[in-house]
Amino acid sequence: MVAAATQARTAVEIGSDAGVTALWVLRGMLPDGVLTTIDPDPARQRAAKAVFADEQVAGSRTRVITRPPLDVLPRLTDGAYDVVLVAVDALSLAPHVEAAIGLLRPGGVLGVVDAALAGRATDAEGHGETAAAVRAVALAVRADDRLVPAMVPTGDGLLLAVRR
């Protein structure tokens, strides 16, 4: 839906898991859109490629990069992406989100999955290091003047933000 609303031609997925989320993003993108998916785990990237093949996604529509995202993101063009989706470990979330914001064009949308941890991250009473890390990112996004954020309370939460 976000990819369709932004008429996305360029998208980045940080943390590919098994490629299922990438399919949803690709379905919303314009027909000539290209999704770059970055994940250091070769097994996850093989699974993503298999999903793309099963769904007959043209090879020209995806770039699969098997490297640590923080090594790759500085090499991507700042301000060039319509959608950037971040799905990484909570304890490494902050630098990935900061890098993702830099990639967005004005009007582009950031998505952060598991941004509420089923309510644990929104509870200031604690719930451990993971919840504190996710909560800190959500608060930083909310305070960032470059962004207009919203929390979607579904599953473990989806933080969305539009780049001004």
Image (cartoon, rainbow, N blue to C red):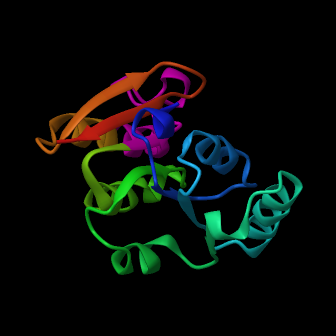
* Number of numbered tags placed on the structure image: 0
Pick the quarter of the image with the C terminus.
top left
Residue 7, placed above or below residue 89? above
Nearer to us in this view, 16 or 119: 16
Of 140 and 146, nearer the camera is 146
Q: Is residue 94 magenta?
A: no
Please say if 74 is above or below 111.
below
- Identify the residue at image location x=43%, y=32%: 5
Q: Residue 107 appears at what percent x and percent y?
A: 26, 42
- Residue 120, magenta (yes or no): yes
Magenta stretch, residue numbers: 110-135
Q: Is residue 111 left or right of residue 49?
A: left
User: Residue 8 in the image: x percent, y percent?
Assistant: 45, 47
Task: Name the residue furthest right.
Answer: 54
Quadrant of res 156: top right
Residue at 53% across, 47% down: 30
Going by the image, does 91 lie left or right of 164? right
The residue closer to the viewer here, 70 or 100, is 100
Residue displayed at 65% across by 40% down: 24
